Structures are given as structure tokens and as C-alpha cells.
Image (cartoon, rainbow, N blue to C red):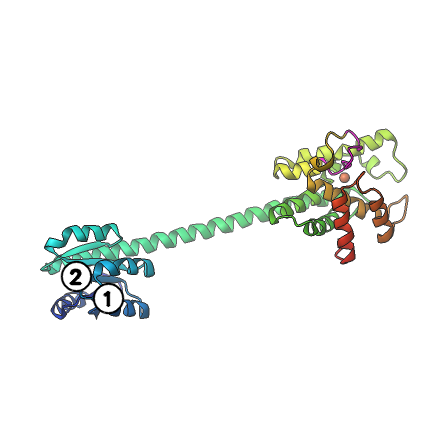
């Protein structure tokens, strides 16, 4: 027996049949409504929730066969039982293929009608349960994915903090480079996905400095060429650190962020547009932040001086397109 009064709509042009079905089904705690045409049935479906339609196949005007697909597309949660004369069984079977839940034959065996209604409503309830469960599972997956992402981002933040704690002169450098790089990426029209990669690439671009000797990293004087070589290994070390946890594009950005556009950088193997765009963007953002920050051996340049210096190196050390993006970004004061 149903746990609540579900509404059934009996659609038949013969009043005697409607009344017969209503008497039987009302006695089984269903709420019964009647319609004598397809048009009236559609009106009633539009105005109140109907759990199940008992639909006569042959009616004047729009037939039950024509009405069935309209009900199924407009009200997919409504079950439909076709009512047919015995000699229409092939038509009734065709209706099942088009989404009807069952069919009953005239003259009706009222107990069979009752069973058919119970089965169709039970199937409908199960479909609701499956749908609710699917939705519950999707929500759980989304929740878990959010948690994993939060933990992952926390781990990256921790890595960046570990790097900045080790380097006494460049506190906040990675985060500032990220802001500048994203402004440049935006100016260059990067896709949402590429911007996301650029965010992680720039935040972690110097992460390889974790493997650099602290004395050399914090040396206030000019570096020897050996020390410089040692420091510059951080690009390769950083790419190696990041590779297992982020995608290959990000580790390549980190690997090449000190490459010179014209190929003249230390131990450089690629040049020009073969250098990943993210790396070319980080190179400019990195240089801009380094020049405009105080260092123990020199004070910060002004923004104008730093831009002039970067412009001077456009086409040699830096990609001209990225330098132009820096100029435009500086004009609109977004850095
Ligand atoms: Fe670097």
C-alpha cells in the first residue's frame, strides 16, 4: 500500500470507465482525477503533480498514443499505464517501447488494474530513490574532491613558505611573481586552464632553491661563477620536485624560467617560442619583481627604471610579446 495519497489521472472519453476506475482506485487510498480529452489531461498535468496517468489509447481528438510522448517528455516523473482493447495489444506493446510503464486490457479485471498501478508506482519510487542516491554520491564526491584540493593547496603553500623561510632576502617574492605573472597572462589572453597552470608554475618557480646551499643563497656579495652555476640548478631541481604532483606543463615552466628568449642563457637547450609561454611570462615577472625589490647589495629600482631595463632586453633575454604585455599592464596600473 502506498504511504501517502498519490494522485492518479484517469484519461478516458467514456465516463463509465472513468467512474469504474475511480471507484476501484479511490478505495485504495489514491487521489483520483479525471480528464475526458488529451487537452484536458495536459492542463491538469500542468497544474498539479500527477504520479500516474491511466491513458486510454483510443480517444476522439488527440489519441493516447499521440499524448504519451508529450507526457514522457514534459513530465518524465509521471508513470503512464495505457488502457487498450484486447485487439490493440500490438499498439500497447509499441507504447511500452515509447516509455509507457504498463498496459491494461478492456474489459478491465479490476484487481489486475490495481496491481498494475502498484507496480508502476513502486518502480517510480525506486527510480526516485536511485536518483536521490546518485545525487548524494555526487555531492559526497564533490565534497571529498574539495577536501583533497584544499589539502593539496595547503601542501603547496607550505612548500612556498619553507622556501621563503630559508631565503632571508626574498620574502614574498614567489607570491608577488605570481600576481605579476597572472596579470601578464591575463593581458596575453590565456585560457582559464593555462592561467591555472601559470598560477602554480609562478608560485613554485623557485622551489628548487630548497636544494641550494643556504650560505650561497644568502650571500650578500657578488657570486663566483661556480656559485652562480650552483644557484641556477634550482630551475631543474624545482621541475624535478614538482613533477610528481603537478602536470608536465607546470614542471616545464619551472625548468625553463631562466631561459633567455635568444637562447643565450646558461646551459640552455631551447630558445624562442619553443620555451613554454608560461616560462617566458615568469621570466619577465621574476625579473620585474627582483629589480623592484631591495637586495643587500643594491636598493630597489623604480618601476620606470625596471621597465626600461626589461624593454632593453626585449627580444634577447625576454620575449617581446610578454614585454609588451608588461608595458600594457603597467599603463593600466594592474601591477
Ligand atoms: Fe628562479
Report x, y in % for residue 17: 13, 66
Q: Splitting the image into 4 quarters, where does residue 43 fall? A: bottom left
In this rendering, position of residue 214 left or right of residue 143: right
Disc assigned to residue 58 = 2
* Segment colored magenta: 256-267
Question: Please, what secondary structure does the residue beneath circle 2 have?
Answer: loop
Q: Residue at x 45, y 50 (%)?
A: 138
Instruction: Tell me which residue sits at (21%, 51%) in the image.
Output: 94
Label 2, residues with CA under 10 Å away: few <14, some 14-19, many ≥20 = some
Mark 1 or mark 2, which is nearer the start of the sequence? 1
Q: Quadrant of the N terminus?
A: bottom left
Which percent across, then down, holds residue 131?
37, 53
Question: Is 257 inside the magenta-drawn segment?
Answer: yes
Tell me the element at label 1.
helix
Kindly report the distance in space between the C-alpha atoms of the residues bearing marks 2 and 1: 11 Å
The residue singled out by tag 1 in the image is 38
Q: Give x and y (percent) for residue 49.
A: 31, 66
Amino acid at each position: 500500500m502506498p504511504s501517502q495519497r498519490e494522485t492518479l489521472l484517469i484519461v478516458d472519453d467514456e465516463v463509465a470507465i472513468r467512474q469504474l476506475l475511480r471507484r476501484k482506485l479511490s478505495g485504495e487510498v489514491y487521489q483520483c482525477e479525471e480528464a475526458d480529452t488529451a487537452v484536458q489531461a495536459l492542463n491538469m498535468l500542468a497544474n498539479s503533480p500527477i504520479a500516474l496517468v491511466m491513458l486510454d489509447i483510443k480517444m476522439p481528438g488527440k489519441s493516447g498514443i499521440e499524448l504519451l510522448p508529450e507526457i514522457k517528455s514534459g513530465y518524465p516523473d509521471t508513470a503512464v499505464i495505457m488502457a487498450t482493447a484486447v485487439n490493440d495489444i500490438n499498439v500497447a506493446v509499441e507504447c511500452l517501447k515509447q516509455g509507457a510503464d504498463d498496459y491494461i486490457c478492456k474489459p478491465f479485471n479490476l484487481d489486475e488494474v490495481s496491481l498494475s498501478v502498484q507496480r508502476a508506482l513502486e518502480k517510480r519510487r525506486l527510480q526516485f530513490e536511485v536518483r536521490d542516491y546518485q545525487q548524494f554520491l555526487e555531492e559526497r564526491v564533490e565534497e571529498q574532491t574539495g577536501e583533497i584540493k584544499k589539502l593539496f593547496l595547503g601542501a603547496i603553500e607550505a612548500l612556498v613558505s619553507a622556501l621563503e623561510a630559508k631565503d632571508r632576502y626574498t620574502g614574498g617574492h614567489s607570491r608577488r611573481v605570481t600576481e605579476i605573472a597572472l596579470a601578464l597572462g591575463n593581458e596575453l589572453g590565456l585560457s582559464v586552464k593555462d592561467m591555472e597552470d601559470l598560477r602554480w608554475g609562478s608560485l613554485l618557480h623557485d622551489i628548487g632553491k630548497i636544494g641550494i646551499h643556504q650560505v650561497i643563497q644568502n650571500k650578500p656579495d657578488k657570486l663566483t661563477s661556480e656559485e652562480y652555476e650552483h644557484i641556477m640548478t634550482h630551475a631543474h631541481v624545482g621541475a624535478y620536485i614538482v613533477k610528481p604532483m603537478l602536470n608536465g606543463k607546470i614542471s616545464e615552466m619551472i625548468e625553463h624560467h631562466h631561459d633567455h628568449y635568444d637562447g643565450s642563457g646558461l646551459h640552455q637547450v631551447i630558445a624562442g617560442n619553443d620555451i613554454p609561454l608560461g616560462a617566458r611570462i615568469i621570466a619577465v615577472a621574476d625579473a620585474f619583481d627582483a629589480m623592484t625589490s631591495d637586495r643587500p647589495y643594491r636598493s630597489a629600482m623604480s618601476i620606470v627604471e625596471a621597465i626600461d631595463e626589461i624593454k632593453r632586453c626585449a627580444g634577447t633575454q625576454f620575449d617581446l610579446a610578454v614585454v609588451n604585455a608588461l608595458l600594457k599592464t603597467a599603463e593600466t596600473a594592474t601591477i
